[in-house]
Image (spheres, rainbow, N blue to C red):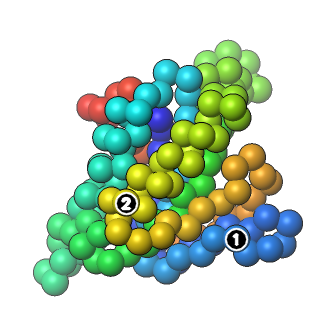
């Protein structure tokens, strides 16, 4: 699983002009799923996201997690995170899982994040053409890949 995590002051997602997910202070998480991803990857990643210390404490040091600041999470599926750009100019998405594998894993990720965060998680709509808005706070943007945990 590969995610782009953005610390945001606010974020939202619309589908066909309808607002379907919105948060204030928290994390916008774009997630790409590939066939090699496992339940262990999902568990590790959810724990990492909820406990990632990227929010400022009273001394303005990024020392607090989204859970500790009572922040929210907006989770949006994005298969293009697995784009291969090595050859030519048209990205290949061969590594991205097809919906029959990716959608159940996305739904499991929603459930696991809600469990670990202790409250509902806002979401996009799997497979839809989404319009995502965000006000990046910092900016802070982090990439996490369960297949490259040293990155």
Circle number at residue 12: none
> Label 2: few (<14), some or many (≥20) within 10 Å?
few
Q: Position of residue 81 (x, y in %)?
A: 58, 38
Of labels 1 and 2, earlier in sequence is 1
Secondary structure state at the residue bearing disc 1: strand
Residue found at the far right of this picture: 16
Q: Write down the residue under mark 1.
A: 20
In the rendered view, tell whether residue 68 sits above or below residue 80.
Answer: below
Which quadrant would residue 75 be assigned to in this image? bottom right
Residue 138 shows up from this direction: no
Q: Is residue 113 left or right of residue 54?
A: right
Camera-side residue: 16 or 131?
A: 16
Camera-side residue: 93 or 138?
A: 93
> Label 1: few (<14), some or many (≥20) within 10 Å?
some
Q: Residue at x 47, y 55 (%)?
A: 111
Secondary structure state at the residue bearing disc 2: helix
Q: Write down the residue under mark 2.
A: 115
Q: Position of residue 128 (x, y in %)?
A: 78, 52
Q: Nearer the viewer, mark 1 or mark 2?
A: 2
Q: CA distance from mark 1 to mark 2?
A: 21 Å
Residue contact between numbered discs 1 and 2, judged by CB atoms under 8 Å: no
Which quadrant would residue 61 be assigned to in this image? bottom left
Camera-side residue: 30 or 104?
A: 104
Which quadrant would residue 38 be assigned to in this image? top left
Q: Is residue 80 left or right of residue 139?
A: right
Q: Position of residue 83 (x, y in %)?
A: 63, 30
Residue found at the far left of this picture: 59
Q: Is residue 26 left or right of residue 126?
A: left
Residue 48 shows up from this direction: yes
């Amino acid at each position: 699983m590969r995610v782009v995590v953005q610390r945001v002051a606010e974020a939202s997602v619309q589908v066909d002009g309808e607002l379907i997910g919105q948060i204030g202070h928290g994390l916008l998480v774009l997630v790409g799923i590939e066939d090699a991803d496992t339940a262990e990857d999902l568990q590790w990643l959810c724990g990492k996201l909820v406990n990632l210390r990227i929010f400022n404490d009273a001394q303005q040091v990024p020392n607090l997690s989204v859970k500790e600041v009572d922040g929210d999470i907006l989770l949006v599926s994005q298969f293009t995170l697995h784009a291969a750009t090595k050859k030519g100019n048209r990205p290949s998405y061969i590594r991205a899982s097809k919906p029959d594998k990716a959608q159940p894993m996305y739904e499991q990720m929603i459930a696991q994040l809600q469990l670990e965060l202790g409250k509902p998680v806002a979401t996009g709509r799997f497979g839809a053409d989404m319009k995502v808005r965000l006000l990046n706070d910092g900016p802070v943007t982090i990439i996490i890949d369960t297949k490259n945990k040293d990155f």
